[in-house]
Amino acid sequence: MRIKIDTEKCEGHNRCFVVAGELFELDDSGYAHEVGDGKVPAELKEKARLAVTNCPELAISIDEDD
Ligand code: SF4
């Protein structure tokens, strides 16, 4: 599994960081980015899905097969 943030859509609400801080980091302006290459460890898959459903801008996508 891999997560990806559409930086055009991200408005910096930081909900992703609140629900899955292991998978997201914030830049100096409060916008989120994937940690590393976005690869999601098996134990964090549910958190990744939670982040997707909590993003009000629908900015986070998941590739289940990557
Ligand atoms: S919740 Fe969505 S809009 Fe908010 S910082 Fe995360 S990716 Fe960006």
Image (cartoon, rainbow, N blue to C red):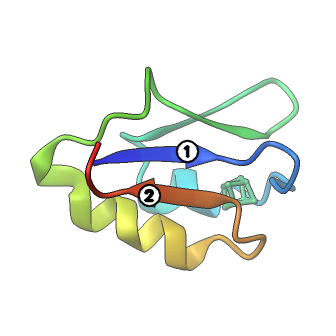
Between 9 and 30, which is closer to the camera in this rendering? Answer: 9
The picture quadrant for ligand 1 comes to bottom right
- Seen at 23% across and 58% down, the residue is 45
Label 1 residue SS:
strand
Residue 53, horizontal then vertical, whole percent: 52, 79
| Residue 20 versus residue 52 in the image, above or below | above
Q: Secondary structure at mark 2?
A: strand
Mark 2 and ligand 1: say if the CB distance to the nearest ligand atom is below 8 Å.
Answer: no
Q: Provide the residue designation for mark 1.
A: 4
Which quarter of the picture shows residue 32? Answer: top right
Image location (x, y in percent) of residue 61? 54, 59
Q: Residue furthest left?
A: 43
At 70% from the left and 71% from the top, the residue drawn is 58
Measured as percent of width and height from the top left, residue 17 is found at 54, 50
- Please name the residue shown 45% across and 47% down the image: 3
- Type of amino acid at the residue the image marks with label 2: Ile
* Dot 1 amino acid type: Lys
Q: Residue furthest front?
A: 65
Q: Are marks 1 and 2 in contact (CB under 8 Å)?
A: yes
**Mark toward the start of the polypeptide (1 vs 2):** 1
Distance (Cα) linking label 1 and label 2: 6 Å
Quarter of the image for residue 55 reads: bottom right
Residue neighbourhood size for the residue with mark 1, other residues' Cα within 10 Å, grouped as few (<14), some (14–19), many (≥20)? some
Q: Could you tell whether 39 is left or right of 58 in the image?
A: left
Q: Is residue 58 above or below residue 2?
A: below
Question: Ligand 1 within 8 A of label 1's CB?
Answer: no
User: Which labelled disc corresponds to residue 38?
Assistant: none
| Label number found at residue 62 | 2
Quadrant for the C terminus, please: top left
Kindly identify the residue that appears in the image at 64 percent across and 46 percent down. 5
